[in-house]
Amino acid sequence: MDKKKDFKSSFAMTNVERREMALKIAQHSTLSFDEAFSLLKNGQTSDERLQRDEEFTASKKQLLEKRKFSRFYSCSLWAQGRKKSFTFDDWKPEMQSDSERAAAIGNKAFRLAKELEQQDFNVLLTGSVGAGKTALALAISDKLRNFKTTLFVSMVEWKNLRMGAIKSPEKQREFSRLEQMMKDAEVLLLDDLGKDNKDSNGRATQDTNNMLFGLGDARMGKTTIITTNDSQSELARKYDAAVVSRLITKNPDHTISTNGLQDVREV
């Protein structure tokens, strides 16, 4: 038997066979029936065209995801409106007096970032002012920005926006949009938790507790990275237990303390 005659190329197909094949292609790809029939008639096999179509679809999906990642991050609420950036390459342990501890802290943050590429859990960074909490949180989020939607929110600016929303319909709409994005983002970085609205006893107001409770509830199964000057016991005193249980991790492996490090803005 002549093996060449066993192979039926698109040239060897009858028009009826081409139509049947074109119909199948159209059902399983983004091509129309006419486009599929024309390609078969011109000699391109269905497998080749399907492969090209799948590659195009994957490329388009990747582009749309990249735009979505950028859109989320562009809506971040920065302290004093100044966008910040920091990567693990910017972490310089040798500039610290205790360089060994600084290196260990940086390595732990890097390991958490790698784990967060595949998993979702909350992270807590505590420490004194300027000791690198926000810097490391930004470095972690920088590693994730190409994989997940990421949003940075300064709790100080969140408080200011929330106060402005009371009297301004425009600010109210802005606040509502931000609140929804905070719930939707795959990775949310809350900077300076504890500096939001407080009552005369230094506890978070009930409105703040209600908002954070709703946020924590909506973010179950997602990643929330929190930086704070407060200890875990201080956070437990300031916020309702239901808020703490939803947003503050109890896992020491997911907690980083930068206490004892020099101000990273001065080293």
Image (spheres, rainbow, N blue to C red):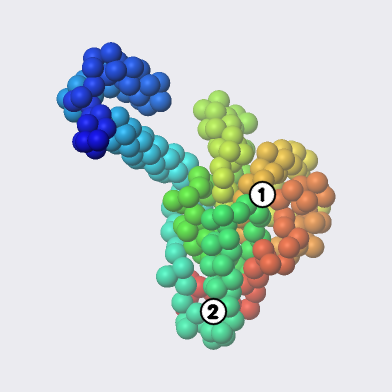
At label 1, counting other C-alpha atoms closer than 10 Å, the crowd grade (few under 14, some 14-19, many 20 or more) is: some
Residue 164 visible from this viewpoint: no
- When the figure is inspected, residue 22 is found, relative to residue 221, above or below; the finding is above
Label 2 SS = helix
Res 122 → quadrant:
bottom right
Label 1 SS = loop
Reading the image, the residue beneath label 2 is 103
- When the figure is inspected, residue 87 is found, relative to residue 2, above or below; the finding is below
Taking 82 as reference, is 243 left or right? Answer: right
Reading the image, the residue beneath label 1 is 196
Res 216 → quadrant:
top right
Can you give x and y, in whole percent of width and height, for residue 120 in the image?
62, 52
Residue 54 visible from this viewpoint: yes
Q: Nearer the viewer, residue 249 or 82?
A: 249
User: The residue under label 2 is which amino acid type?
Assistant: Ala
Q: Nearer the viewer, residue 42 or 98?
A: 42
Q: Nearer the viewer, mark 1 or mark 2?
A: 2
| Residue at the image position 78 percent from the left and 40 percent from the top | 206
Can you give x and y, in whole percent of width and height, for residue 265 in the image?
48, 71
Q: Residue furthest top?
A: 16
- Mark before the other along the chain sequence, 1 or 2: 2
Q: Residue furthest front?
A: 1
| Residue at the image position 67 percent from the left and 46 percent from the top | 221
